[in-house]
Image (spheres, rainbow, N blue to C red):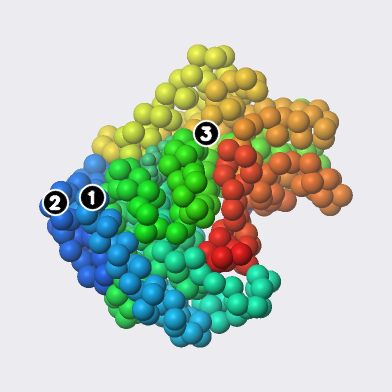
Amino acid sequence: MADDAIDRVAGAALSGEPGWEYAPAPESREIVSIANEYGLFVDGEFEPAKKGRTFPTINPATEEPLAKVALAGQADVDRAVAAARAAYEQVWGPMPGSERAKYLYRIARILQERSREFAVLESIDNGKPIKETRDVDIPLAAAHFFYYAGWADKLEHAGFGPQPRPLGVAGQVIPWNFPLLMAAWKLAPALAAGNTCVLKPAETTPLSALLLAEVCQQAELPAGVVNVLTGAGETGAAIVAHPGINKVAFTGSTEVGIAIAEAIAGSGKKLTLELGGKAANVVFDDAPVDQAIEGIVNGIFFNQGHVCCAGSRLLVQESVADHVVDRLRQRLATLRLGDPLDKNTDIGAINSRQQLDKITELSSAGEAEGAHRWSPPCELPKKGFWFAATVFTGVSQSHRIAREEIFGPVLSVLTFRTPEEAVTKANNTPYGLSAGVWTEKGSRILWMAQKMRAGVVWANTYNRFDPASPFGGYRESGFGREGGRHGLAAYLDV
Ligand code: NDP
């Protein structure tokens, strides 16, 4: 859109006048059939939890109950680990890599074939906009299976010695922000390397992992190779602590990551942790402003900011700060918040009431500590969990909103004068997962990338993912890498 058109629409929205209205463009729910009740996926079959316990999963955009899901206890964990062990020893471990690859390809192809169904289901259970599940979550999940299928018969060429060995049974605990994608990040490299898996999706988003279990059946994956145990934190803790687990992979909060590291210390289990972040997105005065604005918006408002690598701290050079913030406000006024299944929606629902409370509390703390809070005029739906895009200016480094992971659509703006100051401020965090740099100078990009302590640094872009590219953090953001050749190392005895 030309600048004057952006100004017109944004100006209208900021003044509360109607700009232009988008006609509703809802994606149909018909393609998805949600059962009333779901069992655990153990040894190739769905079965109720041994104690018969269940928990509800709801649509966070409407609070409508979707289904009852089995809650796995210790006896279920024992059974799933035993099934995974048997599959590892008798079928999957001894199977040639070229055969394992075929199953991974099959899963990838079925994900593609059923992508619309997955996209709709993920939007309903998670609250994220359909355009993101359709264009990002599901295609990337399939891409991970394709990518690691390619490695399954080439492990001896991956740089880990002539005959790298799998570890055995992997216990994998994933969060709610990218439910299917995180399952793919965990399962694909583990399976390619010859391990079997016990996966626990998050309590608020179990449905796409259960549909993936159905895909495993459809692909005729041997029983026990992938087991999906739904449940709460205690289920995750039981998987992690189980003596039959050889490798633990966790994505989630730093707090739980630390608890897991303590729980398995000395057990000999191999561990990778992908934890929180408080990334700096650094905009220099020579950056192309319109592109930077898109990158800032994508960095923090993509997936309602429920992104560990979100660019939640905008560091902008003082000489252009006012201009950048003005442009950003204009752009935010054009974002559409609402029905996640509408193809025009930019900002969907917050995943849970608990997360909404956390975002609300931290945002109130930002105001109380003296930062200036701004949101575009925006009507929130009456039911469900919603939070308007929010920008804080006048933020200082000691404010909680500059230090703590909010995990919501909330941006804290800080300024800097020199590149050295930008680096110091960017690194002034206990985290170290990701960062962004916006400048037209290639030499400055390289200098910044060397100086910033972050596992991933994006230059003149943000939130770009590719299965071939390793991802992971330093310090309180965890350790180990997922994706690429490095992602295999986490599942091999190297
Ligand atoms: P958690 O870290 O608690 O949850 C992540 C996963 O771990 C879920 O499957 C959870 O199960 C499980 N889990 C919880 N406790 C344990 C345990 N003791 N042992 C093993 N597994 C466990 O994140 P929350 O959902 O509670 O979110 C809290 C905050 O964490 C967010 O506000 C956000 O700041 C941050 N977060 C960061 C993520 C990231 O990718 N960096 C992802 C998610 C959250 P269950 O869902 O059933 O509780």
Label 2 close to label 1 by CB (< 8 Å): yes
Badge 3 crowding class, 10 Å Cα cut-off, few under 14, some 14 to 19, many 20 or more, is many
Residue 397 numbered tag: none
Q: Residue 34, relative to residue 297: is it above or below?
A: below
The residue at the far right in this view is 443
Q: Is residue 79 above or below residue 392?
A: below
The residue drawn where x is 36% and y is 78% is 90
Q: Label 2, on which residue?
A: 51
Residue lying at 42% horizontally and 23% vertically, measured from the top left: 361
Point 63% across, 67% down: residue: 485
Percent x, y of residue 143: 51, 70
Give the residue at x 48% y 85%.
Answer: 96
Instruction: Tell me: 385 left or right of 275.
Output: left
Q: Amino acid at mark 1?
A: Gly
Q: CA distance from mark 2 to mark 1?
A: 7 Å
Determine if residue 122 is in view: yes
Query: Where is residue 150, by image quadrant?
Result: bottom right
Vertical placement of residue 474 versus 114, above or below: above
Query: How far apart are labels 3 and 1 at the CA level?
Result: 31 Å
Alpha carbon separation for disc pair 3 and 2? 36 Å
At label 2, which amino acid type do we have? Answer: Lys
Residue underneath mark 1? 73
In this figure, which residue is indicated by the disc labeled 3? Answer: 405
Dot 3 or dot 1: first in sequence order is 1
* Mark 1 residue element: loop
Can you give x and y, in whole percent of width and height, for residue 19 in the image?
A: 48, 41
**Is the CB atom of the residue marked by disc 3 within 8 angstroms of ligand 1's nearest atom?**
yes
Q: Observer-nearest residue: 15 or 295?
A: 295
